[in-house]
Amino acid sequence: MQTCIFCEIRDNQKESIITEDENAFVILDKYPSSDGHMLIISKNHSTSMLDAEDIVISKMFLLAKRMALRAKQRLGADGVNVSTNIGKEAGQIIDHFHIHVTPRYATPKKGFLVHKELSAEHAKDLIKRLS
Ligand SMILES: [Zn+2]
């Protein structure tokens, strides 16, 4: 069986977790669409939202709301996209249920390059600001 990268992060990369609750944890997207792009990831492995429990889905969207607020308050985002992809045709890359919280800025952040791998240094700073 192939290892799931999100299960691997849940089990072995605690330092990359911004915050968590009983159902889910939050990390930064490694190839962000915008500065501060976060992923809300279910603790139990389900392939997508369609095979996750209703209560888990509800709680995860509440966590997404909390992180969207932090993006506005702490990163100065002007808007935020909250979305989940179901199936590869919809852009789902990792087959483990997650919600994207993507901050949007009226003025593009200086030096930000879309989908460029996040540096360890910048990740550290963002985790500190968003925790
Ligand atoms: Zn998984």
Image: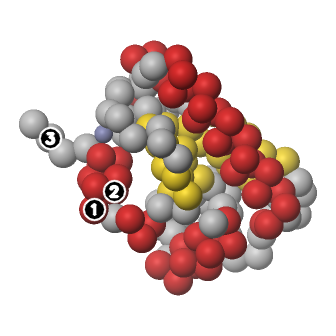
In the rendered image of this protein, does residue 82 appear above or below residue 31? Answer: above
49 sits to left or right of 75 = left
Is residue 105 something one can see in this rendering?
no
Is residue 38 something one can see in this rendering?
yes
* Label 2 environment density (alpha carbons within 10 Å; few <14, some 14–19, many ≥20): some
Tag on residue 128? none
Residue beneath disc 2: 9
Say which quarter of the image contains residue 32: bottom right
Q: In the image, what residue occupies the spot 54% across and 78% down?
A: 124
In the rendered image of this protein, does residue 15 appear above or below residue 81? Answer: below
Q: CA distance from mark 3 to mark 1?
A: 16 Å
Q: Where in the figure is residue 24, as x and y percent of width and height?
A: 48, 42
Of tags 2 and 3, which is closer to the observer?
2
In the rendered image of this protein, does residue 11 appear above or below residue 83? Answer: below
97 sits to left or right of 36 = left
User: Of the residues under marks 3 and 1, which one precedes in the sequence?
Assistant: 3
Locate the C terminus by quadrant: bottom right
User: Of the residues under marks 2 and 3, which one precedes in the sequence?
Assistant: 3
Residue beneath disc 3: 2
What's under tag 2, amino acid-wise?
A: Ile
* Label 3 environment density (alpha carbons within 10 Å; few <14, some 14–19, many ≥20): few
Tag on residue 12? 1
* Label 1 environment density (alpha carbons within 10 Å; few <14, some 14–19, many ≥20): few
CB atoms at circles 2 and 1 under 8 Å apart?
Answer: yes
Q: In the image, what residue occupies the spot 73% across and 41% down?
A: 65
Say which quarter of the image contains residue 122: bottom right
What's under tag 3, amino acid-wise?
A: Gln
Locate the N terminus by quadrant: top left
Q: Where in the figure is residue 49, as x and y percent of width and height?
A: 48, 23
Disc 2 element: helix
